[in-house]
Amino acid sequence: MIDLSVNLGGLAMRTPVTTASGTFGYGAEYAGVVDYSKLGAVTAKGIRLESWPGNPMPRHVEVPGGLVNAIGLQGPGVEVFLSHYVPEYVEKVGRDAPPIIVNIWGGSVEEYAEVAARLEPRFPIGAIEMNVSCPNVKAGGHTFGQDPKVLAEVVGAVRAATKLPLIVKLAPNVPSIAPYVKACEDSGADALALINTIPAMVIDIETRRPVLGNRTGGLSGRCVHPAAVKVVYDAHKVSRLPILAMGGVYEAKDAIEFFLAGATAVAVGTALFTDPDVPAKVCDGIAEYCERHGFKALRELVGALE
């Protein structure tokens, strides 16, 4: 038996595989479809203080090797999440359900902190993932991850507001990830999530108009994987914070690349839309790789790049 358990900044995960925010609903939507025992956690869709309508339609478009989306973080607000979606998750998935990583965002430093304060560290809530870098939300979110000083302020405020493990999700579209990693580390983050989607745009040449209602969106899928591996590698070189890696995880090979680059855990996102069994297949493939190469625990693989 291969030990697949990992610790992501204080979040104990029985496997190193979770789901990416925005691709798995609020946790219960895949009940009866996926094998939750193969998941170390599930990551909920982005939550802010109040409900949010998201962006105008159309909101997504397929491109070669991936997807461009501009959902705009539509959501019900934190109180509805706690009163409805969390109990539904426990009811449908069971008491052995993996912990929920709650993705949060806000339009101000104060809102981020208030949302975090509403999330008590009790089952099934296991950690907070701060979205400071979403490229397709005009109000809030997108500005906080572009300035290390502002990033440090909002991370510090959330750190002071919660005892939950704090994961900060960063954008790849910066000249160097190092100052943003340092800002997170110095301000009390427990882990990093890398990468968020890459800003992108698709144009309908017949109408000469943008395809998305928001005009621009975020690129995800197989096509972003090599870029994501590079960002994870760069972050691991300058920090000891554990990394939740995401971006083009479709099979075990993709996850193993992330581990070798320095990731502690991985998230499956866009691949879920075409095959909900991808997380289980990735988990099994990681175990098979470790056994074949003589690793007794997945942890031995982290940062083991020759």
Image (cartoon, grey):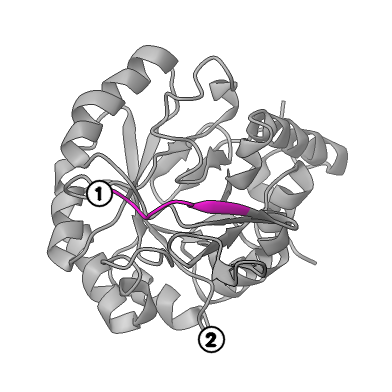
Depth check, front residue: 5 or 245: 245
| Residue located at (25% from left, 34% from top) | 81
Q: Quadrant of residue 304?
A: bottom right
Q: Marks 1 and 2: CB-CB under 8 Å? A: no
Query: Residue 47, percent across and down?
Result: 28, 46
Going by the numbered disc 1, the residue's amino acid type is Trp
- Residue drawn at (51%, 45%), measured in percent from left and top? 20
- Quadrant containing the C terminus is bottom right
In the image, is residue 161 part of the stretch drawn in magenta?
no
Figure check: 128 above or below 139: above
Residue 10: tell me if it is visible. Answer: yes
Q: Is residue 55 in the magenta section?
A: yes
Residue, disc 2: 175
The spot of residue 203 in percent (x, y) is: 61, 69
Q: Quadrant of the N terminus?
A: top right
**Label 2 amino acid?**
Pro
Which labelled disc corresponds to residue 52?
Answer: 1
Going by the image, does 287 lie left or right of 187?
right
- The answer to whether residue 94 is seen in the rendering is no
Magenta residues (range): 52-61
Q: In screen coordinates, is 156 left or right of 218?
A: left
For marks 1 and 2 on the same chain, the one whose residue lies earlier in the sequence = 1
